[in-house]
Amino acid sequence: MEIVIASKKHIKYAQIISETIDNSANQRGTGIAKRTPEYIEEKIKNGNAVIALEGEKFAGFCYIETFGGKNFVVHSGLIVHPDFRKQGLAKKIKTKVFKYSQKKFPDSKIFGITTGLAVMKINYELGYKPVTFSELTDDPEFWKGCQTCRNYDVLQRTNQKMCLCTGMLYDGKKKSKKEHPYNSKSLSRLKRIKQSLFLKKKEKNKKTD
């Protein structure tokens, strides 16, 4: 398995990357914003993406975006092809893009929003901490990316203060002290509460329309 910084020779994988992200969103039934092949191509051309390959076969991907004048860096589109799941590849890709981001943007805070418990666990192990959305970038370009997510209406209803996603932040200038071990049960419970709270309200609003 090869995990490298994507270059122009990897543009040919843009279509399958886009399709894999979209299929994953449909299967999970939760919020994953769509990424077009053209959008993926742009990230690859700018040297802001990591790709995993098994020979010539696409295995996984993740890309970098900057916001707020490069004060914030986010890792998006983390995906592993179904043929390579449950092998620890997501963590390897995430670790690669995390270290690359630290080197390329040493003064930036790194953050992400996700509904995936596996990604939360990886982030926590890298030193991220769960935070409120108010601690993340206020750059409208970032939040615009949520418009293609099926749960975007939740974000709108809460005035961009919360959603089904959990915000996580890594601040290299503040040494992380893990006061508590990673607790998947607590995060799973939080996810269920959010889904129950927001999705039930969504259904209620539909019935009253």
Image (cartoon, grey):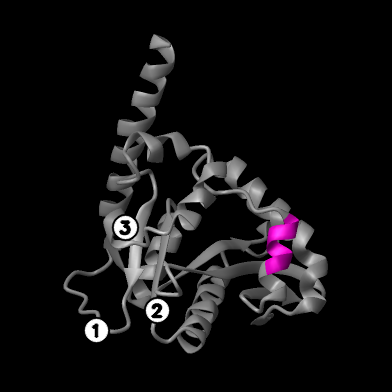
Residue nearer the viewer, 117 or 42: 42
* Residue at the (72%, 51%) spot, across then down: 19
Q: What range of the chain is rendered magenta?
A: 37-42
Mark drawn on residue 184: 3
Label 1 Cα neighbours within 10 Å, binned few <14 / some 14-19 / many ≥20: few
Note whether 105 is above or below 89 in the view shown: below
Which numbered disc, 2 or 3, marks the residue closer to the eye?
A: 2
x 56%, y 74%: residue: 93
The kind of residue on which mark 2 rests is Ser
**Inter-mark Cα distance, 2 to 3:** 28 Å
Residue at the limit of the structure toward the top, as seen here: 208
Q: Please tell me the numbered disc located at residue 108.
A: 2
Task: Give whichever of discs 1 and 2 has the lower sequence position.
Answer: 2
Q: Is residue 5 magenta?
A: no
Identified by mark 3, the residue type is Ser
Quarter location, residue 62 = bottom right
Circle 3 packing at 10 Å, graded few (<14), some (14-19), many (20+), is few
The x and y percentages for residue 178 are 21, 75
- Dot 3 lies on which element? helix
Q: Residues within 10 Å of mark 2 (few under 14, many from 20)?
A: many
Mark number, residue 175: 1
Q: Residue at x 37, y 58 (%)?
A: 138
User: Is the Cβ of the residue at disc 1 closer than 8 Å to that at disc 2?
Assistant: no
